[in-house]
Image (cartoon, rainbow, N blue to C red):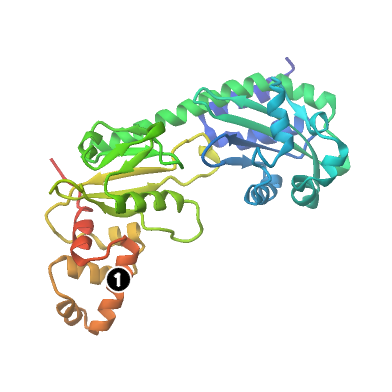
Amino acid sequence: MDSRFASIVDEIYEAAFIPEKWLRVLDLISATADCAGSTMFLAARAKTHFIASDCLLRTYEDCVKAGVMELSQNPRASRMLAKNHPGFITDTDVLSLEEIETHPMYRLGLRPTGFGWGTGTFVPLINGDMLVFSCEKYFDKGPVTPAGVSALDELRPHLARSAAISARVSFERMRAAIASLAEIGLPAFAVDGACRQLAENNLVDELRQYVSHGAFNTVQFRDRKADRLFRNAIRSIDRDGPGTSRSFIAYRPEDDLPPAVIHVLPIRKNAHDIFGRAEAVVVANLPNPVRHPNADILNNIFDLTPAQSRVARSLLSGKTIQETASELKLSRETVKSHLDAVFVKTGTHRQSDLVILLSSLLIRSG
């Protein structure tokens, strides 16, 4: 093993435990095959997550948004997968030159940005996901050569082992984070983009009266309205803008039990957590005696403006709309307008529900 190859292998294994290093690895394997850049993305998931070399990022983002990277729309990927070959395969191995010239992935996605030739491989992960490494070459430099494929094949076993470790490390980090919430008295669990539960802490039994599980461990709230808000929150995580409210109240329809307040905390995706299966952490607690929550909490969790936060805190203290208007030196109509905005941002519809929701932000102790 020459020193340059050994150095690349070292960096591949470094990425197993330091996920931020995967972008550097993608650049290294691209150079090995005389390609401009590489991507790494997960297939057969509720959602597609990927990281890419800087030169490819915008191109792949556009292709993913257009849907041409999905297996059903991407003949290069689907035919590579069908071959079940434990190595890299070039586009010319699975597509005719006419297909390369005419398929939307090339014609509308890769070619306009200068690309047009590539090679890739599928790596199955122990959790059932499929990882794809893809190297793209500029069109004017011609197809990926057999020598380039051979070099990538030498690196592939190391890429596969390192990726498997990264996936496991990511899962253990997620479990540790969920478990830590139990230490401050919060039942919590993690879900993926299809609302499937992936991990939970030891307090989650407190939620059994509010939550059930369907096929494939899919989380379902017994309260239909809460379930609808929950699913909307998960669907809205990657949309532009604030999206649907991520905090709501869940009742137990059959019993006269205290309502649980549910907070859906999105896990934001970036380059270093492609292996994280969770899309959100769901945290729950029961209401506490009403006190004044910190204004910063209201602003940060619900994106309230300062004026909306002042109105919410005043109403939470038990004041009426008229008393709040007098205290804040605002008209009754202005207070009602702020209150309507607070209802929208918190997913509530009545002042009593708002009080329950906001009081839950004062975390239980003891």
Please identify the quarter of the rendering in which residue 83 is found.
top right
Where is 6 relative to 245, above or below? above
Q: Residue at x 33, y 42 (%)?
A: 220
Q: Is residue 102 left or right of residue 211?
A: right
Q: Residue 357's spot in the image, x, y percent?
A: 23, 57
- Relative horizontal placement of residue 29, taking residue 126 as reference (left or right): right
- Residue at the front extreme, as displayed: 254
Is residue 9 rendered to the left or right of residue 174?
right
Instruction: Please state which of residues 336 and 34 is positioned toward the viewer in this rendering.
Output: 336
Q: Which residue is mark 1?
A: 308
Of residue 265 and residue 102, the one placed in the foreground of this image is: 102
Q: Position of residue 225 (x, y in %)?
A: 30, 54
Q: Residue at x 35, y 48 (%)?
A: 264
The answer to whether residue 185 is left or right of residue 30 is left
| Quarter where residue 324 is shown | bottom left
Q: State how many labels appear.
A: 1
Look at 30% across and 72% down and name the residue there.
340
The crowd level at tag 1 (other Cα within 10 Å; few <14, some 14-19, many 20+) is many
Residue flagged by tag 1: what amino acid is it?
Gln
Tell me if residue 5 can be seen: no
Residue 267 visible within the image: yes
* Residue 53 screen position, x and y as percent: 67, 42
Q: Residue furthest top?
A: 1
Secondary structure of the residue carrying numbered label 1:
helix
Q: Position of residue 127 (x, y in %)?
A: 49, 25
Image quadrant occupied by the N terminus: top right
- Quadrant containing the C terminus is top left
Q: Nearer the viewer, residue 177 or 216?
A: 216
